[in-house]
Amino acid sequence: MLYMENITKVYDTGKVQVQALTDVNFQVDGGEFVAIIGPSGSGKSTLMNLIGCLDTPTSGSYRLDGQDVSTLSDRQLAVVRNWKIGFVFQSFHLLPKLTAQENVELPLVYRGLSREERRTMAMRALTLVGLEDRVRHKPVELSGGQQQRVAIARALAGDPPLLLADEPTGNLDSASGNEILKTLEELNGKGRTIILITHDRHVADSAGRIVRIEDGRMFETEGAR
């Protein structure tokens, strides 16, 4: 599913070069649930941006779902993001005037699908996260946990091979956070490949495998559930 080899990322500010990642080697098989854990400044956000095709490495190679994406143009990367990766962020990024269903449909608009196709795919995704009875509700009518589940449904709607979750419980209370982790575990149980970025070991323990990153280097995986 995902294969990174000797990935290095250097940011050049003009006055100084900052090496954010050094010789990272990382592989994720289809159907895995992997957590990447590390403190602030460790390089995990840079790694997430590379995995999510939001940035390109300075050196090294990256293959996603069989495609070499390490040298693609910005436009080509945008296509990869739309078709191959579902993003879930700490902030829900839902549009307040749209219903849950309409929010989930948004990324599908860029695929040129008909309204009926978008509706069918959105309903399928909302059912996957247990919100089939909330499709007409707007964000203000939903709890924090439900809003994040709408965001997960939006990420799943286009059926991407990879779900990338960046601190998905960060804005939630503990009960809602546990609800989201349970949802991710259930999705993984159905075969969904998930990479979870977090600084919290409790959150990381939901994954089947944990990888630690410190000072831009990736360390041996630790056991999880």
Image: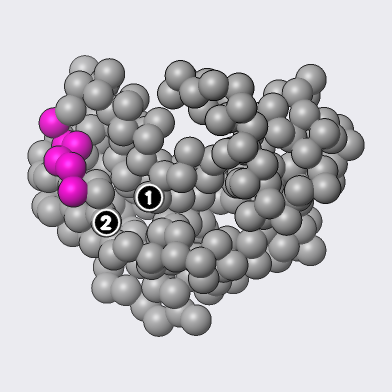
Q: Which residues are magenta?
A: 66-71
In this view of the protein, which residue sits in the foreground, 132 or 164?
132
Disc 2 and disc 1 in contact, CB within 8 angstroms: yes
Estimate the x, y position of residue 116 in percent, counting from the top left: 61, 27
SS majority, magenta = loop
**Helix, strand or loop for disc 2:** loop
Q: Residue furthest right?
A: 141
**Helix, strand or loop for disc 1:** loop
Q: Is residue 81 above or below residue 48?
A: above
| Residue 23 visible in this rendered orientation of the protein | no
Corner quadrant of residue 12: top left
In this view of the protein, which residue sits in the foreground, 73 or 120?
120
Estimate the x, y position of residue 30 in percent, counting from the top left: 32, 62
Left or right of 24? Residue 111 is right
Q: Amino acid at mark 1?
A: Pro
Disc marking residue 1: 2
